[in-house]
Amino acid sequence: MANPQKENGYTPIANEIMDYLCHFRIPGEVRLIVDCVIRKTYGYNKKEDWIAHSQLIAMTRMKKGNVSRSLSQAITNKLVIRSDNKFRFNKNYDEWIRFGVIKSDNQKKVIKSDTGVIKKTTAVIKSEGYKRQYTKDNIQKTYIETDVSLTEILYTLIKRNYPFIKEKSSTKKEEDYKEMNRLQRLDGYSYEQIEWIIRWCQQDDFWKQNIRSVKKLREKFEQLIIKAKGEYDKRKVVNFDK
């Protein structure tokens, strides 16, 4: 029989926040992520901390894809804030965005005509900057300008380290742009975090030999975060202007 005791450890959180959470509706898997962030920060008397996807997977017992999507939703709705490669719970509940408020693709709009007749129409809500591939059943995002910029930054740094490497074809670049977008959109990492890791790994003697494509960057991203965190904790100075 479970018999938890406060003396064995507890997570301090303001009653005002708990009262608000009692009526603020959060989808189940997103709530699991929010609880994990609270546990890994407030539970250790911290305001923010590095939290690896592997930790969230272990704590929630969800699949990696579900963790990534739920974390992205928590960030989008401003329940969780990511900054400087760290996560924190947003205790300013006035900033929280209620789920269902953010418009999605193929959302039905109600339009009132001049005659007063209410008409329903299906409108595609376009996200600025995205190229979209339209199919019969779905709309698939491919990449945005930020994905192109970050990929080019990676190309430039790799070329600086290994000048003899041949430039990629336009077709292969296109695939890299899409892969960069997946790293952000599907895996849940911010563009600021991705750029930081790109610059860090291309100055690390070991990782610059192993990260020479966006595909490999995405594949090893969690390991890169863990390694970078170790260097950060040691207060190692990294000069990205070198």
Image (tube, grey):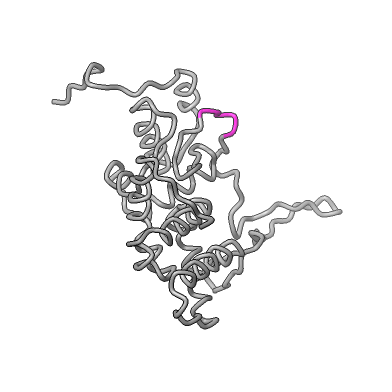
Q: Is residue 234 left or right of residue 58?
A: right
Most extreme residue toward the front is 242
Between 224 and 87, the one lying in front of the other is 224
Q: Residue at x 54, y 45 (%)?
A: 76
Q: Residue at x 51, y 63 (%)?
A: 181
Question: Looking at the picture, how far across and down is residue 92, in whole percent?
Answer: 55, 28
Which residue: 32% across, 55% down?
223
Indicate the quadrant containing the N terminus: top left, top right, bottom left or bottom right: top left
Coordinates of residue 147 in the picture (x, y in percent)? 55, 64
Q: Is residue 139 visible?
A: no
Boundaries of the magenta span: 91-95
Above or below: residue 158 compared with residue 83 = below
Asked if residue 35 lies in the magenta stretch, the reply is no
Q: Is residue 114 left or right of residue 78?
A: right
Q: Residue at horizontal 56%, vertical 44%?
A: 100
- The reply to whether the magenta stretch includes residue 93 is yes
Q: Would you place residue 203 above or below residue 98 in this image?
A: below
